[in-house]
Amino acid sequence: MGKKIFIMTCVHEWNDNRILFKEASSLVRNYTVELHAPGNFKFREVNGVRIFGLAPVKRFLRPLSWIRLFFRSVKAVASVYHFHDPELIPLGLFLRILGKKVVYDVHEDYPDAILYKQWIPKPFRKMTSFIFNLLEKKCSSFFSGLIFAELTYKEGFRNSRTPQIDILNYPLDCEPKERASKETEKRCNLIYAGTVSEIRGAVEMLKTMAILASWEKNVHLFLVGPFPRPSLRAELEEFLKEHSLLEYVTITGRVAPAEVYTYYEKADIGLCLLHPVENNLKSLVTKLFEYMSAGIPILASNFPRWSELLEETRAGLTANPLDPYEIARQVCTLIDNPELRLSMGSSGREAYEKYFNWNGEETKLIRFYDKLLEI
């Protein structure tokens, strides 16, 4: 346990599921692990991980966090520095100049994601994406290791000789809800858990609820997760008022990762209706596997990879994510067939237990670090 891993992020909160509860909590089995991440505290310990809070700041003040992490990382005597944000690439390069081992954890296809960042003026997005892509790929060749949260992310790094590994963002284990197939008259609860934004289907989900309400379906939607654009929450709440949907939809905002599973226990159908942009089309989002782990049947976007996954696992249905009427019809298929919901939920849970759980990823991560540190 003598070797120390210094994990840092200035974007993700300290209790981020992938960073703290998966990767850091796995690495602490073999190493001393420090996590430096946004949090309104100085220090706490969770699962053996020593967590040092980083005062949360607005996006335009984030350089202050970079400076704090610079001084903390230079002061630390760590065997590996593991960072999770592309904006920390310059700090990673500086640590490499000092002879440190540095790992870059790639959470998404950032060049593609930049094309849809609303805080970047639209005329500048393509140029910003192009420049960032060149810099990210060039800089990656100087790091000690690259970790990818999705299989397709490494395609852009195929010319890099840096050691690489896919550590897929499969869920931690949870107890699936006991689901009765005979309760045909009870309210059917839908859930979407994750970042709430237009590109993730927030507007279409509320339009779907308006349609279901007009069809007199006994249904409720839990919209669970943070709003990157705060004004969107006000817009959605106004939509609910205008369409008399306040009794049909609950908007929670951000909740702790553990609390998300309390909403899964209430849910009968999991929604994952992301828009057909490139980053979504080629990725299998974590939400699909979380719903499987909880034994919840899925209604997802009809992307080829997603459709293939749900057909193979028999875990859910698909619909055009831009067509609220088609979504509503598929929801009704599940509402009106409780035996089908039960079967799909069970099949998804079985697939999760066999193929899509964190245990295998934990083994891969520890082996990667053992090799990196030549143990």
Image (cartoon, helix red, strand yellow):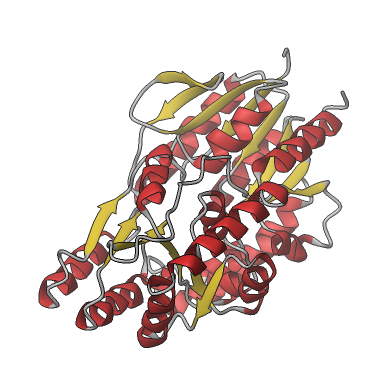
Instruction: Give percent across and percent down for residue 220.
Output: 27, 64
Identify the residue at image location x=34%, y=41%.
57
310 or 168: nearer the viewer: 310
Instruction: Give percent across and percent down for residue 311.
Output: 65, 73
| Residue lying farthest to the front in this orientation | 182
283 or 353: nearer the viewer: 353
Identify the residue at image location x=71%, y=29%.
80
Identify the residue at image location x=82%, y=27%.
373
Instruction: Give percent across and percent down for residue 368.
Output: 80, 37
- Tell how many labels: 0
Vertical relation: 179 (above or below) 323:
above
- Res. 143 visible in picture: no
- Res. 304 visible in picture: yes
User: Which quadrant of the view contains residue 186?
Assistant: bottom left
Identify the residue at image location x=68%, y=22%.
29
Image side of residue 189 versus residue 312, left or right: left
User: Which quadrant of the view contains residue 104?
Assistant: top right
Quarter of the image where the C terminus is located: top right
365 or 164: nearer the viewer: 365
Image side of residue 182 versus residue 375, left or right: left
Instruction: Give percent across and percent down for residue 42.
Output: 39, 20
Image side of residue 207 versus residue 273, left or right: left
Quarter of the image where the N terminus is located: top right
| Residue lying farthest to the top in this orientation | 2
291 or 373: nearer the viewer: 291
